[in-house]
Image (cartoon, grey):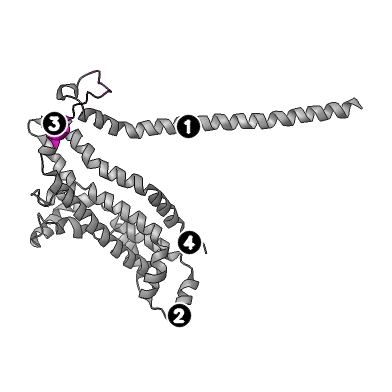
Amino acid sequence: MTRPVRHDETGAASSSVRPATGRGARRIRRGWQAVVAAALLVLFLFPFYWVVITSLNHTSQVLQFPPSFLPHWVFRNYARAWSEAPWLRYFLNTIFIALVTTLLVLVTSVLAGFAFGSLRFPGKNLIFAGFLSIMMVPYVVLIIPDYIVLKDLHWLNTYWAQIFPFAGSVFGIFLLRQFFLSLPVELWEAAQIDGASRFRFLYQVALPSARPALVTIGIYTFLGAWNSFLWPFIMTSSPTVQPIEVGLSTFLGTNGTDWTGLSAAVVFTTLPVMILFLVLQREFMTGASAATGGIKG
């Protein structure tokens, strides 16, 4: 009679040990995950932290060794950096270029994406493959012929040279095409029964459903236009139409680089974008996952 009891006790003991061991392994795994996440956070935040530290130090302390990881609170660097260039004009130029470019990209991406995803016409797949092939060509190799074209159009040193070449996005067309392909056919059939045209179906049914993809494309395009440097640096020559990133080149001179002024300018030109992304990060992540996953019908 003792053996069954002993067996039960042993079994109970062993069953009580196993969950404890499992919980311990989970705690260790979570601990390692937390360590890795903290290390990645430090790795990604350190460059911006270093820029902030540099903007608050004296010029003589920028290149000293060993470096100082604490600021000396030299706030006059910000006042000096702001006075070096017409930053208000740069901000207005950048906002205008980014907003108009984003609007045009959304319009062209919706129309082209809907055509490739929902309509049937000869050569559709071939044309779409041609669009995708554009992504394989680095745009820097086209700068010289593009410069000649813009010169012939008398668009150099204008807003249009910074907007219209980027009014169409292969990424946006591809993303919305994938999204419209996932729309159930029953939606279009129901819309036909109600007498809806293709445009009405796009406007009232497909477009509201594509909101996550539109948010993703909008944020991606806006940030890309805000951070553009090489193209406007080559195609423009006047601060009246140049964006912020070109304005930062003010601190790069033949006598050297003003690292404290440049760092201060980087801080107050980057903060608006960081705040925008932090505010819209949930929309961005939701839009990315929903757009790639499509609609499950």
Sequence-first tag of 4 and 2: 2
User: Real-space Cα distance between discs 4 and 3?
Assistant: 52 Å
Q: Quadrant where the N terminus lies?
A: top right
The answer to whether mark 4 and mark 1 are in CB contact below 8 A is no
Q: Which residue is mark 3?
A: 258
Q: Which residue is mark 2?
A: 194
Amino acid on which the number 2 mark rests in the picture: Asp
Q: Which residue is mark 4?
A: 295
Amino acid on which the number 4 mark rests in the picture: Ile
Q: Secondary structure at mark 1?
A: helix
Q: Is residue 23 left or right of residue 258?
A: right
User: Is residue 115 visible from the viewing direction of this image?
Assistant: yes
Closer mark to the observer between disc 4 and disc 2: 2
Magenta segment: 65-81
Disc 4 crowd rating (10 Å Cα; few below 14, some 14-19, many 20+) is some
Q: Quadrant of residue 142?
A: bottom left
User: Real-space Cα distance between discs 4 and 2?
Assistant: 22 Å
Q: 119 or 28, which is in the foreground?
A: 28
Q: Which residue is mark 1?
A: 34
Could you say where residue 84 lies in the image, as x and y percent from the top left? 10, 38
Could you say where residue 39 lies in the image, as x and y percent from the top left? 41, 30
